[in-house]
Image: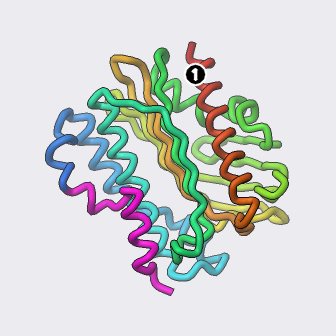
Amino acid sequence: MEFNQVAFRRLLFFGFLVLALSGLSGVAFAQSNEMQDFTKWTQALPVSSELIQQMQNYGIPNAASLAHQIHGSIIASDLQIVTEFENGKCEPVTKVDILGSESGALEGFVRVETIGCFPKGRAESLLKLYFDPDFRKTAIPQLDQVQLNNDILCEQSEKVPFVLDPTRTCVRIQKQQFGNIHSAIVSLISNGQGFSPYFHREAMVTAVDTARGPRLHVLAFARQKQKVSGMFKGMAVNKIISGQKNIIQLLGQSLQ
């Protein structure tokens, strides 16, 4: 099944398409050399071959095409929000959407977006703390184990009734800095045997230093084997929102 028009329009509705970026690249992104360099880096980022392989291993139709569409939408959204940070705008938000059958090939995917606006601290410390194993175990109670080895982060989570089966996943983190902009792209590389697998998991995490304090944007797409639907969908959304807000709160406290 091709990445169909319904799913394509769904991404367009959220404003994620890279093509929507073309009208901005010559205006807002020309404000600083750092923003120009950041834009070039993000637009040149390839889709992880390890991520595509995981999707193919679990029989996701047209895995490469779907992975490219999601990757492009993540990049476009992150560039838009970072541009707003650079222009002095920051509105805290946590959005969660579990995509349904109307989304075609994206059915079952979970989209999570979080924006944090902090009065104190530095972006470099903020990004480092976000991936710190001790912090993540404190901020995300369902995590049993967290290990960070160079650019590989592995996490094992317990079961969250009606929401999440036990998982063990490893992701690769690619970090880059462009002046006041610190960013990381996170891509799934493996699932642990005997655990409920993720078919897809990719995120962009960007922290920006501004005159009013550091800003954080996190945008993630994920698709687990277990689909959440029906009466449990609302429970899952509320659980994820609560978890994201807890992360932001603890980040702010740690930066004081």
Question: On the rendered structure, is 148 left or right of 39?
Answer: right
Question: On the rendered structure, is 87 left or right of 52?
Answer: left
Quarter placement of the C terminus: top right
* Residue 101 is one of the magenta-drawn residues: no
The residue labelled by disc 1 is 252
Residue 49 to residue 26: above or below: below
Taking depth in this image into account, of 38 and 110 the one nearest to the observer is 110
Looking at the rendered structure, the kind of residue marked 1 is: Gly
- Which x, y percent locates residue 8? 40, 72
Q: Residue at x 39, y 30 (%)?
A: 90
Q: Residue at x 39, y 53 (%)?
A: 75
Q: Residue at x 75, y 59 (%)?
A: 232
Q: Secondary structure at mark 1?
A: helix
Q: Residues in magenta?
A: 1-22
- Which x, y percent locates residue 137? 75, 35
Taking depth in this image into account, of 179 and 112 the one nearest to the observer is 112
* Residue 5 is one of the magenta-drawn residues: yes
Residue 254 to residue 220: above or below: above
Classed neighbour count for the residue bearing mark 1: other residues with Cα under 10 Å, few (<14), some (14–19), many (≥20): some
Furthest residue toward top: 256
Residue 211 to residue 220: above or below: above
